[in-house]
Amino acid sequence: MNIWRIAASAALAAAIVPAAALAQTEELKSEEMYQVELADQMRPHWVWVNDVSFTRPLDGRAYLLDADSGQFLGMVSGGYAQGPLQITRDGKRFSMVSTYYSRGTRGERTDVATFYDIKTLDQTGEVVIPPKHFISLPILSTARLSDDDRFLLVYNFTPEQSVSVVDVAAGKLIGETATPGCALVYPVAPRRFFMQCSDSALQAVSISEAGALSLDATTTKLFSDDDPANEKPVRITPAEWLFITRDSEVRIVDGSGAVPKVKAKWSLLDKDTAEWRIGGLQPSAYHARSGRLYTLMHVGDRDTHKDPGTEVWVYDVAAGKRVQRIKLDGPATALAVSEDAEPLLYTVMFGVDELAVYDARDGTKRRGITGLGNSLSVIQPAPVAP
Amino acid sequence: MNIWRIAASAALAAAIVPAAALAQTEELKSEEMYQVELADQMRPHWVWVNDVSFTRPLDGRAYLLDADSGQFLGMVSGGYAQGPLQITRDGKRFSMVSTYYSRGTRGERTDVATFYDIKTLDQTGEVVIPPKHFISLPILSTARLSDDDRFLLVYNFTPEQSVSVVDVAAGKLIGETATPGCALVYPVAPRRFFMQCSDSALQAVSISEAGALSLDATTTKLFSDDDPANEKPVRITPAEWLFITRDSEVRIVDGSGAVPKVKAKWSLLDKDTAEWRIGGLQPSAYHARSGRLYTLMHVGDRDTHKDPGTEVWVYDVAAGKRVQRIKLDGPATALAVSEDAEPLLYTVMFGVDELAVYDARDGTKRRGITGLGNSLSVIQPAPVAP
Amino acid sequence: MNRLDRITEALARSAARRLSRRSFFGRLGAAMTVATVPLLPVSRAAAERGPQPPQPQEKGDPANCDYWRYCAIDGFLCSCCGGSMSSCPPGTEPSPITWVGTCRNPVDNKDYVISYNDCCGKSACGRCECNRNERDTPVYQPAGSNDINWCLGTQSGVVYNCSTAVVLGAAS
Amino acid sequence: MNRLDRITEALARSAARRLSRRSFFGRLGAAMTVATVPLLPVSRAAAERGPQPPQPQEKGDPANCDYWRYCAIDGFLCSCCGGSMSSCPPGTEPSPITWVGTCRNPVDNKDYVISYNDCCGKSACGRCECNRNERDTPVYQPAGSNDINWCLGTQSGVVYNCSTAVVLGAAS
């Protein structure tokens, strides 16, 4: 809870020692307040944690933390059941999609994409969007920036399904395209993404330079109804997403062609670990520099797909092989990994007010940052340009 | 946490026994949902508890509980830092004063008085009021109904001070009157109230039939600056309010004349209890039928006026004498007493999610109703016509 | 018959709710038939309408997450919030569409299709939080997904108060 | 000289804040002179402006409720929320008017007038909740009352994030 133990102790070490001498003679000075400003870009070990505030969902928020120092750097307030942020690739700006009612819980609904900069954590603009954005427990793919940060793509559910497009540079809504049967947004190129459909197929979608969406090719059914892919994949290359099923089967989907294709299949499990399963709200993370996949694992059956993990298993994705098991200090429902060359592993447990910070390489716990509220859902590390 | 242990067990006692026989043959029936409706009037042991939701203040609310059964009957959602309810004298309707922003934490501010009925806990109307109502930790006198329920009087602070008047019957705002230096609303007759002023005087105010306010006479300074009266008095007769100071001195103010007058002075303490003080957010309550004052007491100095009480001390107000000491099951920052002939004593502790229910006569704890959130501030029992 | 088909068929047979197969299970139609929730006539004295109790052929504590009907629930039990498994607390509106689960009643050992209608229009009740995920589906298969805010179909808006677990009928 | 006079005099002497005596302490005037909070020039590299540290003549932990300046605070310490005792977290706005307290600095054993400016425009930080009430006044004596939401004077609006404890000057 103490940002000062680190920040101030260094500054004060020099200051407080002479203070004893000064104290007899010099009064404290009148102070002038100011607002803290941050660096203009997220540093590699800065990390956002979403607090959906499940028991008080009108007051959702996200916290910005410095995992190296343990400092709480600041926060943003969101709307009803606040979802994740969309962070630009340079880590200088971000947006979020929020729902507000004119009378808190009732009245007129307004959905809005709000844009912020990191330096001030202050809003720089907003765009009102169709009042139908998908509201659920936070899932990263409900709204995504296009790869060049030009367009914000927002998945809607009323239960009719559609995607709204915001032109970020122009600060205006471009329009909304129906996507019947298909959900969520998985970018694979600056002008291309795919969606997950209820029949376990994937729908390719392209974005025109003007921001218009076209529904392109659809795959055949890629997953069985009894063992569906989760909706929390990780992106391993610009065009590839790694999906994991209920039974911990891995499927890497390549979206670079006209029709998304399954490029690789393997399992997180083997005969010695058949009773384990992946689980949680954000159950996997990928570290591109090392080609490592991190997964939250627990012992349980197919219906335990939201149960917290007790261990993190680390895989070499190219080889499709597990290379490490990390025993967690406590159970976790979400994990993420910083993108830099000295990666940190972050976990939170829905219901516990702490972000746990581990060394991603040796699995030792570095620190816990507490006092963050009891509904921590998804973790969003700083983007680091590869 | 179980409303069914009481409600359903009786109903099911007869039903479940024959069920074993039925079970072999009869399938469960398809059910049709409906909304629960309450009696159209608060019962004597129904009680509202405000949850200001201090760590998530955009999501304030109040819970309606049945202290006899322990049932959670329902709730209402409020606005930012939600304050108390204004319950009509017949216990059939209530209102609340709320603040909303168009973007949750920012944007355009709208203050509104919203009207509800008990039967449906649904809103029956609203009146937009000047966006300046006083926001603080909940205090009962920030907004009050006139004694005939005709006008709602709302104290404003910007920090300019004023009172807004809503015509409840007509469902419209009448206007706003500046009350420089004076705060809060203490009704003493259907068309009359007084206010507490920063110089420890009281300001009489009259209400015309049309709802216009006139500032009438002002008292001299009634309390010393070192031992001010608190802003949480209890009303002991239509025209009389009982104030208690930091040092636990009682002053009964009679507002029936043109100028409010101190009618009685005595102390909660004597030489054996000089180290005790009254304290809390709602530190006293009055039971009119028995003429008893209930106070939350703790050991502490003058600056502990918000500290929780460990005991409830009971006074005969007419005699100015303590008649009972009740040791609480746990510390409490608020207390209230039901108004009926078999009074219950209610307490909550800010930070604890429980309403504790005691027999007000013998001080035994009847039950705790838990799961109510961690910022319980004020307690509002059912009004019972004398 | 896979479980989606089973659920769909149960829905199709249900007279209480008419949930179009197309939007959720097919890819062609975007139209949605949203049934209004029928209200029971007022049956009690003094215009009071208490929470609807469980049926006789059930046992257990409807305020406990382990109750059989809650096998795929996610949220606050309306039974702890002024309602019951099949009635909404005062002043909240039942969602006309929602996710469904299939749970086994231990009394008759039969599977039933359970509709987890949200009650909406007041903020989270906060009591009796439960999360069970039997046969819960991903959010891109919405009809079985308990992560979605199902208040979206109401007049009140999306603000979620608590969850019910209504018997629609036998699953097979 | 009673404590209201002491506080008022300290305020009057403070160059940093100009808080009209009239609205709070008098009964005649309703006008309010609201000073804008002066900003220090940006002093660090890369446009970053870190939290303002305590002064040399202090000791203790500014993230602890027991710190001397917090003798009349009520709320979340900005020191735990991205700010400090005298700076607001990023994106929050300092309230130009507020309540004041008088606290004794144990290092020099002098009383100082402390201004508990709120930082506003984002919701409650929720960390390091403190409530100390030395010389706290009732809400009808606002200038010394910590129960009031002091964000009312900002451009952002009344939404409260955290509390600072700014030294205005010596109390006597």
Image (spheres, coloured by chain):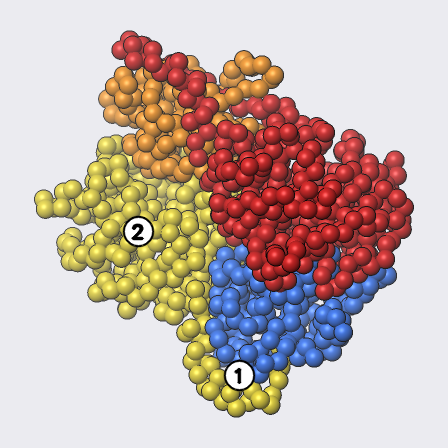
Chain colours: A yellow, B red, C orange, D blue
| Residue in front for this viewpoint, B194 or A220 | B194
Q: Tell me the residue at 29%/36% (across/down).
A: A201
Measured as percent of width and height from the top left, residue B345 is found at: 58, 38
Q: Residue at x 54, y 13 (%)?
A: C43
In percent of width and height, residue A321 lies at 14, 54
Q: Is residue B152 left or right of residue B220?
A: left
Distance from Cα at disc 2 to Cα at disc 1: 42 Å
Residue D56 shows which numbered tag?
Answer: 1
Quadrant for the N terminus of chain B in the image = top left
Residue placed most toward the observer, A303 or C43: C43
Q: Which residue is mark 2?
A: A332
Name the quarter where the C terminus of chain B is drawn.
top right
Residue B267 visible (yes or no): yes
SS for tag 2?
A: strand
- Residue C144 in sight here: no
A353 vs D87, left or right, is left
Q: Are marks 2 and 1 in contact (CB under 8 Å)?
A: no
Circle 1 packing at 10 Å, graded few (<14), some (14-19), many (20+), is many
Residue drawn at 52 percent across, 17 percent down: C39
**Residue extending furthest toward the front:** B272
Which residue shows up at 42% across the image and 27% down it?
A: B5
Q: Quadrant of residue B43?
A: top right
Q: Where does the image place residue A4, in percent across and percent down from the top left? A: 45, 72
Residue C142 lies left or right of residue B226; in this view the side is: left
| SS state under label 1 | loop
- Answer with the quarter of the image where residue B117 lies: top right
| Amino acid tagged 2 | Ala
